[in-house]
Image (cartoon, rainbow, N blue to C red):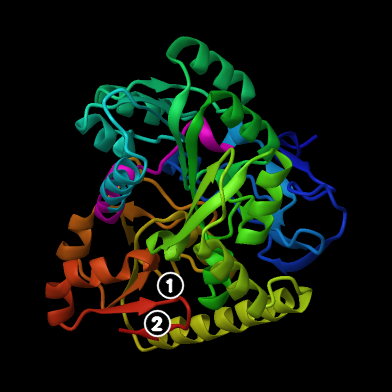
Amino acid sequence: MSKQEDCISRRVTCRVCGSKKLHKFLSLGPTPLANNFLRKDQLDSPEAFYPLDAYFCSNCYLVQLLDIVYPTVMFKEYAYLTGASKPMRTHFAELTEDVIQNFKLSKNSFVVDIGSNDGTLLQNFSKYGLSTIGIEPASNIAQLAEDKGIQTVNDFFDEECAVRVCKEYGPANVILATNVFAHVDDLENILRGVNHLLSNNGVFIIEVPYLLNLLNNMEFDTIYHEHLSYFAIYPLIYLFRKLGMVVVDVRQVPVHGGSIRVFVQRTGEQSKNVAELLSMEQEAKLDSFQTYLKFGNEVFLLKEKLMRLLKMLKGEGAKITGYGATAKGSTLLNYCKIGTDILDYITDTTPFKQGLYTPGRHIPIFPEKKFHEDPPDYALLLAWNYADEILQKESEYRQKAGKFILPIPEPKVI
């Protein structure tokens, strides 16, 4: 058995409803893990590639991956740091204010964050004197959180973990799972854990990229092995109802190309926000397989347009680099087969990534200093979800005739 086969399993049923009515609409080809950055001495060694195909369930309308790379392979060591992103720090500060005010939290309240990363979100709650615990499987990231004074359980969250935490610390008033719920294959196990740990009147809050934004804005590069599910409201309601919980409210938030913040409790009435988004999903025909087939065809056309643009610029002698060694960038680079023949290098603010090479395409990653010392004619904006902040930040580069290439939703030079 190959190393790849050792690390992957395949579902035959939908992870929300259990149906076998699953239909493939997009294949991004064999792809390496998006955050599996390489050292120089690893470049000549065999690299693991896994299928990256998206499926639609015609029973509950969940969009999902069926090829599951084991979480211990992806998450025990991790290269993404929440605290390295200024927009995410701002977003989490606003989320904290929202939760404290709307749920009337006090210093007696207990907040748990699932997939707590480097503790950036919980730091905000700690500033208000609330008790907090982070649950983080990546040992390198969990240690960073501990170094910040954020108590962190270095483990995957499931029912067993929830029982241990509840026994030691008591029930949680708030359980958060921001940009982590879509990473989970066994959703019912997670929710049994939430049900055990959550206080009777507590709230479970998740943030996930919104499927409607993915489709409308051609965000195909947000599809990678860590993201197993691509949620709309309807399958979330279906899932939580199975576990005896209610989606009481939902809000759209701008992070990660457009996400939804979903509030779940044991009892309660659905807000008008829930009804409005369900209506939008129905109007967008998210229940029709034809919607996804159309998207798959448009992704192929986008790839062709982007490659024509890059090859034209390269043919004119332009120097092109990448901006942001993002996970979504890994999908885009590997699907479009963009390597060092197109990009001289990529810059990124995350210390863990600097000095390494991108998965699959092996493009070197440098600190931002390189971008300013050795500026390109064009920079492919792989971190397009932070486009506004980056364009403002790099105003001097742009004033000196430097240009950015925005790949999503339509390739263009700005």
Q: Measuring 38% from the left and 68% from the top, which residue is drawn there?
A: 384
What amino acid type is highlighted by mark number 1? Ile
Of labels 1 and 2, earlier in sequence is: 2
Q: Is residue 35 left or right of residue 298?
A: left
Q: Position of residue 108 (x, y in %)?
A: 31, 22
- Report which quarter residue 111 is drawn in: top left
Q: Quadrant of the C terminus?
A: bottom left
Q: Position of residue 202 (x, y in %)?
A: 48, 33
Q: For the residues labelled 1 and 2, say whether their Cβ atoms are less than 8 Å apart.
A: yes
Q: Nearer the viewer, residue 339 or 84?
A: 84
What amino acid type is highlighted by mark number 2? Lys
Q: Quadrant of the N terminus?
A: top right
Residue range of the region highlighted in magenta in the rendering: 74-90
224 over 101 or under it: above or below = below
365 over 299 or under it: above or below = above
Q: Is residue 11 left or right of residue 292?
A: right
Q: Measuring 43% from the left and 14% from the top, which residue is drawn there?
A: 169
Q: Position of residue 49 (x, y in %)?
A: 65, 50
**Of helix, strand and loop, which one carries label 1?**
loop
**Residue extending furthest top?**
168
Q: Which residue is mark 2?
A: 314
Q: Is residue 337 left or right of residue 40?
A: right
Q: Which residue is mark 1?
A: 342
Q: Residues within 10 Å of mark 2 (few under 14, many from 20)?
A: some
Q: Measuring 16% from the left and 64% from the top, which residue is drawn there?
A: 372
**Residue extending furthest right?**
20
- Report which quarter residue 162 is drawn in: top right
Q: Nearer the viewer, residue 97 or 230?
A: 97
In the rendered image, is residue 226 in sight? no
Q: Would you say residue 84 sits in the magenta stretch? A: yes
